[in-house]
Image: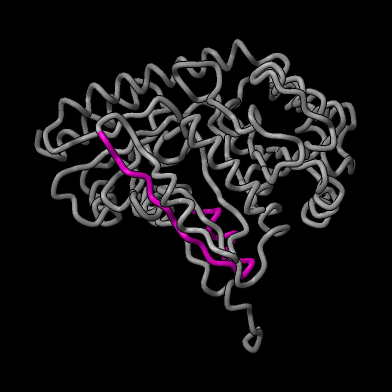
Amino acid sequence: MTGLEMRPEFLKLRDSEIRAVWQMGFTIPDVVGLWVGESDISTPDFICDAATRAMKEGKTFYTHQRGIPELRQALIEYHQMLYNVTLTDDRIAVTSAGMNAIMAIVQSLVSPGDNVIGVSPVWPNIFRCVEIMGGSTREVPLEPGQNGWFLDIEKLFAATDHRTRVIYLATPGNPTGWVINDSDRRALLDFARKRNIAIIADEVYNRLIYNCLASPSFLEIAEPDDPLFVVNSFSKTWCMTGWRLGWMIMPRNVSTQMERLIGFNTSGAQPFLQEAAIVAIREGEEWVRQWVDRCRQGRVFVLERLRNMNRVSVIPSEASFYLMLRIEEMGDSIEFCKKMVEEAKIGLAPGAAFGKGGENFLRLCYAQSELKLAKGMDRLQNFLGN
């Protein structure tokens, strides 16, 4: 293999800065890890039991590339319940994780020389997808304020040019918890229609919001043929991060080609996981309510502790299960996080991992037990000399 010539885009791929810190915890015992975007509770039994039952019933064969019809129907009913929108079956595709959906969309839209605009700070994997396809990325950072994060929509529009194929935004956002307001949502969709630019709306955290049932969705204002892709996942709402199962809602005129692309990528998601996903949707609302309430309590607990620490300031948010915090005289966020792991045995994610606007911050995931959060806050407070 010594003479094998790999594509330059492949060779330039870099690892996540979060992983560089997270991997330290593999060799240091008793680290309180608040760095990864998942909870400390496993998938609920009623979902796991459904997967086991499906496997025992022999649902282990190849299946529909856009997902089994029963799951697509359950997703239609789910969006009707959340947003009072009626989706047609041909607009829905089940994918092997939310990231698989994003990768497929980027594959379908981005060619070498194209660019993608992304609202940051943001989970960086979308940008790696673009780079793999030979495209470039342009970040438009959110502005932090006392009442949360703010997007200058005119800066977003100004970042586009004739080679812009996609505008990507996560709302609610990871790591910020930012939710786009209604006027910006409508202005962005109108801009995308006029310029024929696709929007990828990552709504993976749409149920992790604390003042309503679900965060506002682009689906509420979009037409079936609008240049809009909405991506979601079972990972966060039902604590199914390791299952790798998601879905997308797409313009109806690309359904056939997207189905083929999914087939070439994965041949479709595992049928027994899809059977469990149906159960999650149709029988899981009470569990989701309790889960969101647990996260709400974690948010309140962590906010109170952080606001009583010297040198610490927090940007509030009403969504996701993260907080972004600043520590005075922190310096480089990656090195600071490594130092915390080594000296205080507490793990946070460096803000630099999330691109422009995140460099001076740390991300904390509060989707954890109060006992774990208390232990982590005690260690952080001691580390800061409070």
Q: Residue at x 70, y 23 (%)?
A: 79
Please name whichever residue, 226 or 384, is drawn nearer the observer in this view of the structure. 226
Which quadrant of the figure has residue 240?
top right
Position of 379 compared to 141: left or right?
left
User: Which quadrant would the C terminus be assigned to in this image?
Assistant: top left
Is 9 colored magenta in this rendering? no
Is 138 colored magenta in this rendering? yes
Magenta region: 124-145
Q: How is the image coloured?
A: one colour
Q: Residue at x 52, y 55 (%)?
A: 117
Position of 302 compared to 93: left or right?
left
Q: Position of residue 203 (x, y in %)?
A: 57, 35
Q: Residue at x 82, y 57 (%)?
A: 264
Vertical side of 297 occupied by 129: above or below: below
Query: Quick one: which residue is furthest to the top in this view?
Result: 286
Vertical side of 45 occupied by 161: above or below: below
Please name whichever residue, 25 or 13, is drawn nearer the observer in this view of the structure. 13
Q: Is residue 33 visible?
A: no
Please name whichever residue, 120 or 63, is drawn nearer the observer in this view of the structure. 120
Please name whichever residue, 122 or 6, is drawn nearer the observer in this view of the structure. 122
Q: Position of residue 266 (x, y in %)?
A: 78, 52
Q: Position of residue 102 (x, y in %)?
A: 64, 49
Query: Quick one: which residue is furthest to the bottom in this view?
Result: 3
Q: Position of residue 142 (x, y in %)?
A: 37, 45
Q: Is residue 311 visible?
A: yes
User: Which quadrant would the N terminus be assigned to in this image?
Assistant: bottom right
Q: How many marks?
A: 0
